[in-house]
Image: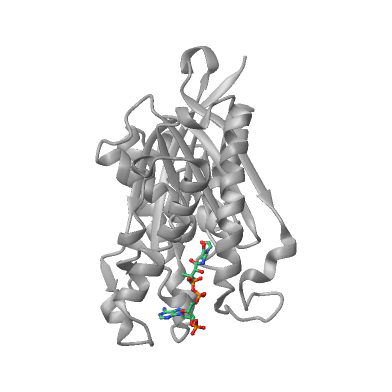
Amino acid sequence: MSRRSVFCGVGGYLPDRVLSNEELSARVDTTDAWIRERTGIRERHIAADDQKTSDLALEASKRALAHAGKSADDIDLIVLATATPDLTFPATAARVQAALGVTKGAAFDVQAVCSGFIFALATADNALVRGQAQCALVIGAETFSRILDWEDRATCVLFGDGAGAVVLETEPEKRAGDRGVISTFIRTDGRMHDLLFVDGGPSQTGTVGKLRMQGNAVFRQAVEHISGAMVEACARGGVDLQDVDWFVPHQANQRILDGVARRLGIPPQKVVSTVAEHGNTSAASVPLALDAAVRDGRIQPGHLVLVEALGGGLTWGAALIRV
Ligand code: UT7
């Protein structure tokens, strides 16, 4: 019997502390005008000293479960995307599993940086369709504030902390109808690993390290590969790009969102943008944007949604979902 992973609910969480562009311009040589003009970012949220990635993930997961009308007992798979785990091991997903009170199935992390949520979604979808699990929490959660070089104006203004989660449930294709994850596309090209990386880690340096990025080069790769991934996800799903109701991109830079939309002839009003309110939250950004557009009623049941991202690795991908 063919099965489908069907979208049941979404939740997002941003820490209370807001760091504005004005505040940042008192710390490094930058201005509110430069940040807005070059990135579209107005502010970002910063986790409290005692808040870990798993705490953010837990909050987003509770909200997603409530929205889906599910409880911890229903969940038998947790796939958590993060580049900022609580500890080197165990997986942050294991901590979230315990904190939620989930007692069955597997929980593990996926590491594809800003593309992490797309990779986690593809991983969970595969497990659900193969019958390895019935109901999955797919989470993107990050505390990038902990790996930023707060003296590097070219990177510290771009990122923020946050978490988002989606609940997916498997249903027989007959019952799911045209709803569910229609296609996924994920890709890595490790030859570009030095365009965006953290200069620390347990094996190479024994330190946590700081984020380093060649912003301009990443920007160019982003517009090209994100566009390609979106076209590929549509082709795999047998869907025309024009028939997509909502585009929910990784929120890195408004200029990347605009560049991709221009390149593919997508009307800007179909593109969900939350980058102004939280900056680049890496793996959390796609579910945070999805949450915003579901909660304000733009995305309605039955709509065709295309999510996409590009991040360190380089990694990139897209997924097509009828919610
Ligand atoms: O999430 C995954 C991937 N990450 C991304 O997608 C990020 C991709 N890259 C970007 O979004 C953009 O490249 C940035 C926002 C990082 C930079 O924008 P840009 O238009 O590519 O600027 P640039 O790097 O070419 O820098 C232009 C100038 C430089 O000064 P000079 O050399 O022209 O004198 C920078 O030093 O802007 C300067 N600059 C700043 N000025 C004020 C860099 N950062 C800042 C800053 N405030 N915060």
Residue drawn at point x = 43 percent, y = 73 percent? 145
**Residue 107 seen in the current view:** no
**Residue 308 seen in the current view:** yes
User: Image height check: is 149 above or below 46?
Assistant: below
Question: What x and y, as percent, mark residue 298?
Answer: 29, 36
The residue most toward the top is 174
Q: Is residue 120 left or right of residue 57?
A: right
User: Image height check: is 24 above or below 281?
Assistant: below
User: Image height check: is 318 above or below 304?
Assistant: below
Residue drawn at point x = 34 percent, y = 44 percent? 291
Residue drawn at point x = 71 percent, y = 74 percent? 203
Which one is nearer the viewer's eye here, 162 or 260? Answer: 260
From the image, which quarter does the N terminus lie in? Answer: top right
Task: Give the colour scheme shown.
Answer: one colour
Q: What is the total number of numbered labels drawn onto the structure image? A: 0
Question: What x and y, as percent, mark residue 92?
Answer: 51, 58
Q: Quadrant of residue 305?
A: top left
Question: What x and y, as percent, mark residue 82?
Answer: 53, 59
Question: What x and y, as percent, mark residue 265?
Answer: 47, 40
Q: Quadrant of residue 89?
A: bottom right
Residue drawn at point x = 26 percent, y = 79 percent? 22
Which one is nearer the viewer's eye here, 161 or 155? Answer: 155
Which one is nearer the viewer's eye here, 267 or 319? Answer: 267
Q: Is residue 200 left or right of residue 102?
A: right
From the image, which quarter does the C terminus lie in? Answer: top left
